[in-house]
Image (spheres, rainbow, N blue to C red):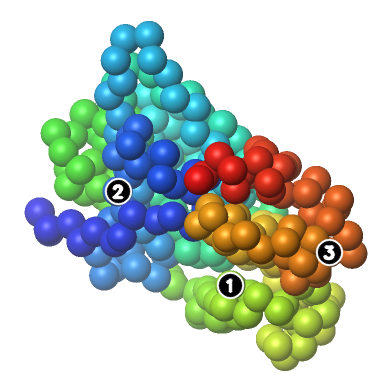
Amino acid sequence: MAMLQSVPRPTRGVVNPGAAEKIFRLERYLPEADLAPFVEHFWLVAWSLPEGVTHTQRTLPRPSVHVVFETGHTAVFGVMTGSFEYTQRGSGRVLGVSFRPGAFRAFLKAEVQSITDRELPLSAVFDCDDAEAERSVLDAPDDAGMVAAASALLRRALPTPDPMVERIADILHTIASNADITQVAQLADRAGLGVRKLQMLFKDYIGASPKWVIRRNRLLDAADVLAKGSDIDLAELAQQLGYYDQSHFTTDFEKLIGKPPADYRRNCR
C-alpha cells in the first residue's frame, strides 16, 4: 500500500479554525498519480467527545462534488450552494473524496448542475453495492486503509481525463488570486470568454454559477481577514468586496458563515 502524502490542515473555508482544531482531527491526503486528474484530495474527520458533549461545526460550500463515506449516510454530494451544520457526538470518523472542480462530469456523464444541491447513492454513479462500499471504507483500520478502499472504488469507474478540467482550474485560480474580481464580466474578460459562454461552462462542468463562485471567494477573503482579528472598518471591507453597502455584505456574510461580520471577528478573537 502506498504511503499517504498529507497536505496542510486547511484554515480557509473552516469556520473559526482556531476553535475547530481543538475539537476534531481533520486530515487531507493527496491522491495517487492515476487519480490526480480527477481528485483534489481525500479528507478525513475523526472525533472522540466525552459523554454528553456535542460540537456543531459549520461547513462552508465549495464548487466541488464530494463522495462521502459516513455510517448510514454514504453518498455522492453535488455542489451545495448553502452552508450546513454537522453535530458531532460520541466517537466517529468520516472520509470524503473532494473532486477537482469540473472533473466529476466525466463520471456523471451529464451536466454537473443536474446534481447541484442534491445527493445520490454511490451506485447511481459507480459500479458498487452501497452498503458494501461503505463498509469497505469505514471498516478499514487506519487512514491509509480508508483512502485505499475509496481509491479502489473510483478506479473501477475511472474515465478518460478531460482537458477542460485544467482550463477550469486556471479560471478558478484567477478568481481566488485576484481579490479585485467581483463581477462576472471582469472574470469573463480575464478568461477570454464571453459572459454567456462562461456561464454555460460553469453550468456544465462545475454546477454553480460564476457569480456564486466569485461571491463565495470574496466572502471567504473577508472571513479570513476577520478570523485573524483585523480591525478593518466593515464598511470599507464591504466596498472592497464589491458590495454597494454594508448591509448587503452583512446579510450575505451571515448567510454563509452563520454570524454577522462583527460577531464573527469577536468570536474568533
**What's the CA distance linking mark 2 and mark 3?**
35 Å
Query: Sequence-wise, which precedes: disc 1 or disc 2?
Result: 2
Looking at numbered disc 2 in the image, what kind of residue is underneath it?
A: Glu
Q: In this view, which residue lies farthest toward the right?
A: 244
Are circles 3 and 1 on residues that touch, CB within 8 Å?
no
Badge 2 is on which residue?
A: 27
**What's the CA distance linking mark 1 and mark 2?**
22 Å
Are circles 2 and 3 on residues that touch, CB within 8 Å?
no
Image quadrant where residue 96 sits: top left
Badge 3 is on which residue?
A: 243
Query: Sequence-wise, which precedes: disc 2 or disc 3?
Result: 2
User: In the drawing, does residue 82 fall left or right of residue 73?
Assistant: right
Query: Sequence-wise, which precedes: disc 3 or disc 1?
Result: 1
Q: Position of residue 192 (x, y in %)?
A: 72, 90
Q: Secondary structure at mark 2?
A: strand
- The local crowd at label 1, few if under 14, some if 14 to 19, many if 20 or more residues have their Cα within 10 Å, is some
Q: Can residue 108 be seen here?
A: no
Badge 1 is on which residue?
A: 176
Q: From the image, which quarter does the N terminus lie in?
A: bottom left
Q: Secondary structure at mark 3?
A: loop
Looking at numbered disc 1 in the image, what kind of residue is underneath it?
A: Ala
Q: Nearer the viewer, mark 3 or mark 1?
A: 3
- Residue placed at 89% from the left, 64% from the top? 244
Nearest the viewer among 57 and 71 is 57
- The local crowd at label 3, few if under 14, some if 14 to 19, many if 20 or more residues have their Cα within 10 Å, is some
Q: In this view, which residue lies farthest toward the top?
A: 52
**What's the CA distance linking mark 3 and mark 1?**
17 Å
- Residue placed at 71% from the left, 43% from the top? 260
Q: Position of residue 105 (x, y in %)?
A: 56, 61
